Each structure stands twice: as C-alpha cells, then as structure tokens.
Amino acid sequence: MITKEKSETKHESRNKMTFERLKYYRHLGGGALECIASRLSKTPKPLCFSLMVTSMCNCDCDFCFWKSKKGQDDMPTDEIVRLLTEAGQIGYMDSILWGGEPLLRQDFDQICKASHDAGLYTKIATNGWYLETNPDFAKYTDLMFVSLDAIGKAHDDIRHLPGICDKVMSGIEYHKIHSPKMRIYVCCTVSTQTSFEQIKEVAQYCKDADILLYFTVNKAASRPDEAENVVETELENDQLSEMFIKIKELKKQGYPIRNSYYFMDYIINKKTYYECHWPRIATVIYSNGEMLRCYDRKPFISVRNRPLKDVIKDPLFIETVNKCKDCKLACVGNYALDASGLWKLEWPAIKSLMEIAIT
C-alpha cells in the first residue's frame, strides 16, 4: 500500500484561499440568486446539472443500484456535449459528472471540456482506478470526488476490486502534482461495512495528504426497478447518530471534513423528515437520457433528441418537480438536505455552508 511521505519542510496547503477560488464564490453566489428567483416562481429554475455519463463500472459495490446496467444505452458524446452546452446557455451554474465509473469513457475529457466551455463549475465523481491512465479530464475539472471508504484491503473488499485503495492514493498524489488547481475531495460512505476506527483512518489520511473529506450516507428511501443483487448496508438511525457524533468531533479537532454542521446535526438528532426542494435545485439525468422521479425511481421524461430548455418547461417536468416538496421519504442525502435548507433560507444551513465555503 502506498503511504504519503511526510515532507521535512513546511508547505502551503493546496486548499488555502486563492484568487482562483473566487470562481467558486461566483458559482455559490449565483446559485443563491437562482434559488431566490426559483422560489418566487412556480416554474422551477434548476441550477445544478447532475449527469450520469455511464452505468459501466469496474467495481461491484454491494450497495450500488446501477451495477446490473453495465453501460447499456449510454448516450453518445455528441448528445452529452449538446446537453452540457444547453445547460450553460439556459442558466445552470454547475455540473456533477458521475457513473458508474465515468473514466471508463475514453471521451470523458471531451465531456469535461464541454462542461467547462459552457461556463459550468465542473465536478466529477470517480472510484479512482483510472486517475493516472485517463487523466486529461482534470484540465477542465474544478473539483473531484474520489471514493475511499477505508484504508488498505478493507476498501478493496468493500468495492470488490483488489488494489483499488493503492490506485486511489497513487492517483490522488498524481493529480496533486499535475492538477494543482483542481480541488480534491475523498468521498467516504458511512455504512454497516465500515467502523469508526476505519473512518478515522480515512480522516487522518486526508489530513496528512492535504485533501478534503466528505461523508455520504448510504440511506436511500427508494430504489429503481433495475437494482439487482443489492445488499442492505444502511445503518439504523441510532447507529448513524452515534457515528456522526464522533465525526462531528473529528471536524472540531481540525480534520478536513467538509460536511456541514447542519447536515450532521440532522443525523445526530435522529430527525426523519425535512421539506425537500432538491429536485427544484438540481436536474438529475441518467446515462440513457431519462430523468427519474426521486421518490420512486421511475422514469418520467427523457432529454434525448430534445432541447433541454423544452424539457424543463414541459408541464410534466414542472408538475413532477413541484410535487417533491410534499415527499415524506426524507432521503438522507447531504446535497438534498443542505440545498433544501438553503432554499428555505434557514440560517443554520446558510451559516454551515458559509463556513465550508471560506475554508
């Protein structure tokens, strides 16, 4: 396993405030204004463009909903480029490109370039296996999430791919050198498959490597019909609360954890409902071009061969998105919870997100 050698000389953190990061503040401020504009209208005005670029993956994670798809009916390059270009033209602020494993696409650098050229703050999510063999995406990427749930063989076992932890660490070091402007986050899934001791090891790795850490919770209220051979790995609310009490303490101790206190306190206090506005903020498109209703994971509209502006003005889209605020499922998703708090202009959510933004 690769370990980071500690430098004998002190160096500046790659996460310090720089002029380059002002681009993020433009994105954040623009997003806040978009939220306000959308609140004043019955017509949703989403600002985040979330695109699954492929369902292909080289891992076989127990909790993955999409592992049976294997890249079936993925959209071609030209269609994805069209959608990203149109997203920028109609006012989306950022994109998140994910999979499956997006770096399995040999055209992924073209996809990232299309997002960048459209003026979108471009983020990607990867399992990290191909970070060095398909690295050109980083030229056009502002922020990268890399999955790492434990250190060493424990992570390999969770992802059912021997050697992936070493690949992740080696790839992160590569991009720290070759992609200095790209922010790097480790994305660690909290589930029955990891202990707090393993999570703390990941936090220590991130602190030593001078990269950021974001915890996700494997707790979805619904799953798609296509989900096959999925193993339940969700922690019960009491267990999840105990875990996040400890994670919150790590954050207070200076570990580079970027989850908001707003999110962590929701879990710690074992809350089970919030008014969700995520679908009004983000448009989530799957690799075959379909949008799925988040409350039952059923497809309801497609973007293929149709202008994006027409899709988000379609009465079916508007009706479906507006219904979501009455959803009682309360998926435990950082993005959905934080964004919904921001949407409602709740001060604890605003304060937590501001604290993250300035660090």
Image (tube, rainbow, N blue to C red):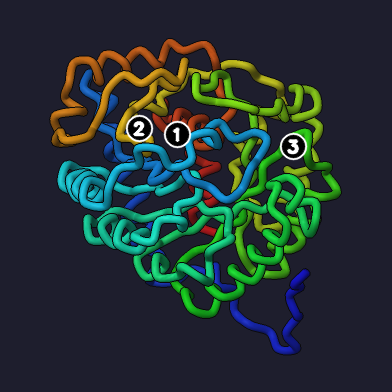
Alpha carbons under labels 1 and 2: distance apart: 7 Å
Residue identifier under label 3? 244
Q: Residue at x 79, y 59 (%)?
A: 152
Residue 294: x %, y % from top left: 44, 22
Q: Image quadrant for the C terminus? A: bottom right
The residue indicated by pointer 2 is 281
How many neighbours does mark 3 have within 10 angstroms: few (below 14), some (14-19), or many (20 or more)? Answer: many
Q: CA distance from mark 1 to mark 3?
A: 20 Å
Mark 2: secondary structure: helix
What amino acid is at disc 3? Phe
First in sequence, mark 2 or 3: give its number: 3
Q: Where does the image place residue 131, in percent across and percent down from the top left?
A: 53, 66
Residue 96, above or below 229: below
SS of the residue at dot 1? helix
Question: Is the residue 282 above or below the residue 29 in the image?
Answer: above
**Among the two numbered marks 1 and 3 on one chain, the one whose residue lies closer to the N terminus:** 3
Q: As shown in the figure, which amino acid type bears the numbered disc 2?
A: Ile
Q: CA distance from mark 2 to mark 3?
A: 26 Å
Residue 282 appears in the picture as rendered:
no
Indicate the quadrant where residue 245 lies: top right
Dot 3 falls on a residue whose secondary structure is helix
Residue that label 1 marks: 339
**Along the viewing direction, whichever of 191 and 42 lies nearer the viewer:** 191
Left or right for 112, reference 211: left
Relative to 97, is 232 on the left or the right? Answer: right
